[in-house]
Image: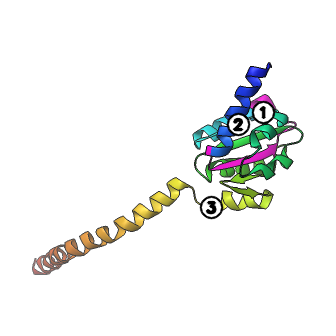
Amino acid sequence: MDRAQKEKVVEELGQIFESSGVVVVAHYAGLTVAEMQDLRSQMREAGGSVRVAKNKLAKIALEDKPVASIADLLSGMTVLAYSEDPVAAAKVMEGYAKTNEKLVILGGAMGETALDTAGVKAVAAMPSRDELIASIVGCIGAPAANIAGAIGAPASNIASILSTIEDKAA
C-alpha cells in the first residue's frame, strides 16, 4: 500500500468515525472467510458496514476526534462495525458474538461517547430507530382505531340485537 492509498484509507476512516451513529470495535481472530462474509451480510441487512483496517491507520484517523479514546482498543486483529442508526451495528455485533465465540467485542463509540463492552451490550439492547418509529406510529394510530371501533359498535350491536329478535320470532 503506497502513501496515497494510506492517506485515502485514513480519510475514509475519519469519515466513518465522524458520521456514524455507532462504531463497534471487536477482535475477529479465528473467523473464517465464510463467517466474516456472513457477518458482513447481516450488517448490510441492518443498514451498517464492517471494515477491517490497519490499526495504525485507524489510530491516525482517530486523532483530534471526540472519541480518540477508543484508539486504545485497536490492537491485534480488529474489525470496525458501524452504522448511521445508533443501535444497528451494536445489535448485529452483539448477536453475532453470542453465536460465534471467535468474535470478541472490545468496545466502541456512540457519537462522542466512548463505550466499553457493557456499553455496547446496553446499546444493543435498545430499540432501533425503525422499531421506535413503528411504536410511535402504533401509539398515534391506536386512538383512531378505537374511535372508529366505537363509532361502528352501536350499529353492529343493533344488528346483532335485531338478528337475535328475528331468530326468537321465527
User: Percent position (x, y) of residue 99?
Assistant: 77, 47
Q: Decide if residue 56 is on the left or right side of residue 50.
A: right
Estimate the x, y position of residue 18 in percent, counting from the top left: 65, 45
Q: Measuring 61% from the left and 37% from the top, which residue is drawn there?
A: 44
**Which residue does the numbered mark 2 point to in the structure image?**
13
Alpha carbon distance from label 2 to label 3? 26 Å
Q: Nearer the viewer, residue 33 or 18?
A: 18
The dot on residue 53 is 1
Percent from the top left, x then y, of residue 27? 84, 43
Tell me where residue 59 appears, x and y as whole percent.
81, 40
**Mark 2 or mark 3, whichever is nearer to me:** 2
Task: Please tell me how crowded label 3 is: few (under 14), some (14-19), or many (20+) other residues with Cα within 10 Å.
Answer: some
Give the number of the disc on residue 126: 3
Position of residue 125 relative to residue 152, above or below, is: above
Q: Amino acid at mark 1?
A: Ala
Question: Residue at the location (44% across, 63% down)?
Answer: 136
**Number of dots carrying numbers:** 3
- Work out whether residue 31 can be spotted: no
**Mark found first going from the N terminus, 1 or 2:** 2
Taking 110 as reference, is 14 above or below it? above
Q: Which residues make up the magenta segment?
A: 19-34
Is 46 on the left or on the right of 148, as rendered? right
Height in image: 136 above or below 83?
Answer: below
Q: Amino acid at mark 3?
A: Met
